[in-house]
Image (tube, rainbow, N blue to C red):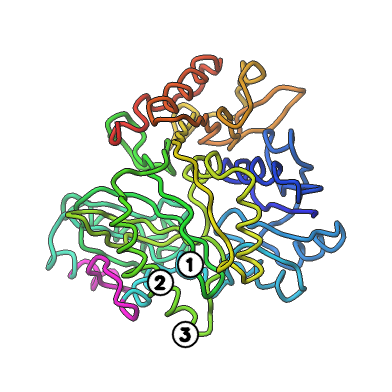
Amino acid sequence: MNILILGSGGREHALAWAVMQNPKCDRLIAAPGNAGMAQIADCAKLDIEDGDAVVTFAQENTIDFVIVGPEAPLAAGVADRLREAGIKVFGPSAEAAKLEASKSFTKEICDAAGAPTAAYGHFTDADAAKAYIRKQGAPIVVKADGLAAGKGVIVAMDEATALGAIDDMFGGAFGGAGAEVVIEEFMEGEEASYFILCDGKTALPIGTAQDHKRVGDGDTGLNTGGMGAYSPAPVLTDAIAARAMREIIEPTVAEMAKRGTPYQGVLYAGFMIKDGQARLVEYNVRFGDPECQVLMMRLGAQVLDLMLACAEGRLDEAKVNWADDHALTVVMAANGYPGAYQKGSVINGLDDLPEDSQNMVFHAGTTEVDGKITATGGRVLNVTARGDSLQDARDRAYAMIDKIDWPEGFNRSDIGWRAL
């Protein structure tokens, strides 16, 4: 098969790495890709949010299967255009992608499905939103309704912060994403992520993970796109996961099908877990980043077969083969992230690191300039390892970090601390 992966981050590098191991993959193209992906795939310049351009490229390159990495092309309807053209695609329709693209839509689905989630209000007017905050008090959570690249959520521990977030959102700080806001009850507990493949009818769990959102050790400092992750997440026990499937995931999939917009792709459910029960924090319509990296380390080549079964509507025949193992990834970011940071610094030492089923450095914000790997993003590398225990995986990952020579970068030193 000729396979096209859309995206340029660590998530897409991890997907490419896993897909390449499957003998069904003859040729792999990444658009636009990054320096790490260029070592295992052909990279192509392409506007991945332009459905017509993606279809034309796929036809010209006799692509059999397209895997959409990020959320923006899905919200833009790229998967719809590919399906219309008769090209197999992994990723939901634009209508189904509203589960991530619109927080208020997700709440509406949860209400219809009876899925446990936070109490909320939905607002298109700043004064009404502020009145709701004053009535509810803090702590409280303020969310831009639309896609804001993972930055449109403010967990306000005091009323002043919440009111300031309303001013920012309606003032255009998050562009069109903040034209409407959802204000939610603050939920206590421990967060974990659950990943489920859906083909419109069948829902198949493929793993759990826990992300580390804060920039600093001990979960301190600003929120980021994620500074590390591990899988499995012990807080999401088999019993809690089974109950969440019954009460949250399956009713959601059924409600989407009932509306004539069946969900096809990966459904990433963020849960808040307390007293043995999961409540939905949010849905994402693509693999998490960096959670995808640890899932791919554990799943390996079989992920292509699973994604194909998903795209072809035969997930009821599919089975996930799990090893009793653990994986952990540490994000190396440019100094200053998630604020302002410099681009163009050279990263040394990568050539000396192992690349196998237990040790991988997935590239996120990198490019190759004059034969040297340079940093071009905020989150730059995902140093990822697999082991028999979480401690083993952690030790391997940090041993690799010790060999990377990049003074302009930093990382958290405590990934996995909750589980360990």
**Would you place residue 243 above or below residue 223 in this image?**
below
Alpha carbon separation for disc pair 2 and 1: 7 Å
Is residue 376 shown left or right of residue 111?
Answer: right
Q: Is residue 120 magenta?
A: yes
Is residue 351 shown left or right of residue 400?
Answer: right
Q: Position of residue 365 (x, y in %)?
A: 59, 36
Q: Earlier in the sequence, mark 1 or mark 3?
A: 1
Q: Work out whether residue 71 or residue 261 is closer to the camera in this orientation and state it.
A: 261
**Would you place residue 216 above or below residue 43 in this image?**
above
- The answer to the question of whether label 2 and label 3 lie on touching residues, with beta carbons closer than 8 A, is no
Q: Earlier in the sequence, mark 2 or mark 3?
A: 2
Inspect the image, locate mark 1, and give the three-letter code of the amino acid beneath it.
Ala
Inspect the image, locate mark 3, and give the three-letter code of the amino acid beneath it.
Lys
Where are the magenta residues, as a range? Answer: 111-131
Q: Which corner quadrant holds the N terminus?
A: bottom right
- The answer to the question of whether label 2 and label 1 lie on touching residues, with beta carbons closer than 8 A, is yes
**Would you place residue 243 above or below residue 95 in this image?**
above
User: Mark 1 sits on what residue?
Assistant: 203
The answer to which quarter of the image holds residue 57 is bottom right
User: Mark 3 sits on what residue?
Assistant: 258
